[in-house]
Image: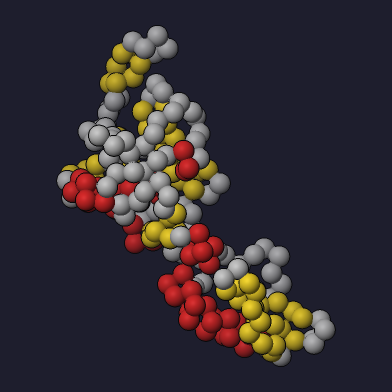
Amino acid sequence: MIALIQKAPAKSLSTGAYHLRQSGVEMSDRARESQTVDGVKVYPIPEWEGMYSVSKCGKVFSWGSWVSNQAGETKKRRKPRWLKPYDNQGYKQVDLGSSPRFSVKVHRLMAAVFLSASSKDLVDHKNRNRSDNRLENLRLADAKGNARNRSTPANNTSGFKGVCWYPRYSKWVAQITLNGKRTCLGYFHSKSDAAKAYRAAADQHYKEFAS
């Protein structure tokens, strides 16, 4: 059996530590094996079947587990419950297992169950909210697509993505990055006009990743 998650003891692991390698067909078949908890449909997480499930709104449910002490002796069984995620640089993360415990970001679990994600796939949050793990807000992306859907930089003075002030001409300039090169789209008296030029170019070249 191909392991969905390469397990290594740690209190906090990066997304890259989890190798989601299950085939698309197997994942899709398992995702259809849903159950209902508190009126919410949940789907088994590959390689954690019978232990953990996740809903399409990004809630992770534990079906209960045996808790071991430091000597490896089983003490008791935890009751079924919804896991409470915690923050990791804006992402929601949960712990699976107990001894050892494995930390994984919720959007990676969602991608494995519903999007047939592999370890090489990047998962993009469409609305750029890292904590919003609803299925409709997630999509697979390559590095370019993921980068194109970033928020406006903090040092941006125009308030519009792709627009900045050009002192030499005393105008606003619209720019877009294509194939790793910055391309000038023109100079404008109004920053809103510059923003329109950027948006048109982004829609043309970035498609669904335009933002």
Please identify the quarter of the rendering in which residue 207 is found.
bottom left
* Residue that appears at 43% across and 50% down: 120
| Image coords of residue 45 (percent x, y) | 28, 41
* Residue that appears at 80% across and 87% down: 169
Relative depth, front residue between 85 and 2 = 2
| Image coords of residue 102 (percent x, y) | 42, 31
Vertical placement of residue 181 versus 204, above or below: above
Relative depth, front residue between 9 and 126 = 9
Relative depth, front residue between 39 and 26 = 26
Tell me if 155 is positioned left or right of 81 in this view: right
Vertical placement of residue 157 versus 85, above or below: below
Total count of labels: 0
Vertical placement of residue 101 versus 14, above or below: above
Tell me if 173 is positioned left or right of 142 in this view: right
Residue 52 is at least partly visible in this image? no
| Image coords of residue 84 (percent x, y) | 40, 39
Quarter of the image containing the N terminus?
top left
* Residue that appears at 49% across and 29% down: 11
Task: Work out which residue is located at the far bottom of the displayed protein and give it.
Answer: 189
Relative depth, front residue between 153 and 87 = 153
Vertical placement of residue 154 versus 30, above or below: below
